[in-house]
Image: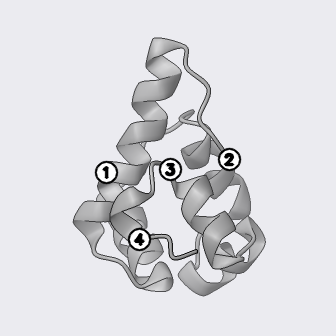
């Protein structure tokens, strides 16, 4: 089954599909694992620099990364659970 990037609804889902842990992405991007976890759960909104680092490490554009991060933030704001 092919999963397209445009079908991804969360950063956590992208990591799962790519077979990457938060630790691995943190090492690739130079971002603390705890920060990635807080972004995935919508606890924090990443800075533009963090978005760029994560996007570069994952091979996607920064606009798409912003969309994935915003989805987690909006879900938390509305009380929804983000799918893994």
Classify the position of the N terminus by image quarter.
bottom right
Image depth: mark 2 or mark 4 in front: 4
- Distance (Cα) linking label 2 and label 4: 16 Å
Q: What residue sits right under mark 3 in the picture? A: 10
Mark in the foreground, 3 or 4: 4
Label 3 SS = loop
Tell me if label 1 and label 2 are in contact, CB under 8 Å.
Answer: no
SS for dot 4: loop
The residue carrying pointer 3 sits among few (fewer than 14), some (14 to 19) or many (20 or more) residues within 10 Å by Cα, namely many
Question: Which residue is under mark 4?
Answer: 4
Residue labelled with disc 1: 67
Left or right? Give the position of 25 relative to 10.
right
Task: Name the residue located 65 percent from the left edge and 73 percent from the top edge.
Answer: 26
Look at mark 2 in the image and give the residue it sits on. 84
- Mark drawn on residue 19: none
How dense is the environment of label 4, judged by Cα within 10 Å: few (below 14), some, or many (20 and up)? Answer: few
The furthest residue to the left: 63
Task: Compare marks 3 and 2 and give the one earlier in the sequence.
Answer: 3
Q: Please tell me how crowded label 1 is: few (under 14), some (14-19), or many (20+) other residues with Cα within 10 Å.
A: some
Q: Is mark 3 in CB contact (under 8 Å) with mark 2?
A: yes
* Percent x, y of residue 10: 50, 50
Query: Residue placed at 29% from the left, 62% from the top?
Result: 64
Give the spatial CA distance, label 3 vs label 2. Answer: 8 Å
Classify residue 72 as left or right of residue 71.
right
N-terminal of the pair, mark 2 or mark 4, is 4
Which numbered disc, 3 or 4, marks the residue that appears first in the sequence? 4
Other-residue count near label 2 (Cα within 10 Å), few / some / many at <14 / 14–19 / ≥20? few
Which badge, 4 or 1, comes first in the chain's sequence?
4
Q: Residue at x 40, y 52 (%)?
A: 68
The residues bearing labels 1 and 2 have C-alpha atoms spaced at a distance of: 16 Å
Separation of marks 3 and 4 at Cα, in angstroms: 13 Å
Residue 77's place in the image compared with 59, above or below, is above
């Amino acid at each position: 089954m092919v999963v397209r990037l445009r079908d991804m609804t969360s950063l956590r889902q992208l990591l799962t599909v790519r077979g990457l842990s938060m630790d691995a992405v943190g090492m690739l991007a130079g971002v603390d694992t705890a920060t990635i976890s807080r972004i995935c759960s919508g606890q924090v909104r990443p800075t533009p620099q963090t978005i760029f680092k994560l996007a570069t490490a994952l091979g996607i554009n920064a606009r798409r990364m912003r969309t994935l991060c915003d989805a987690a933030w909006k879900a938390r704001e509305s009380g929804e659970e983000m799918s893994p």
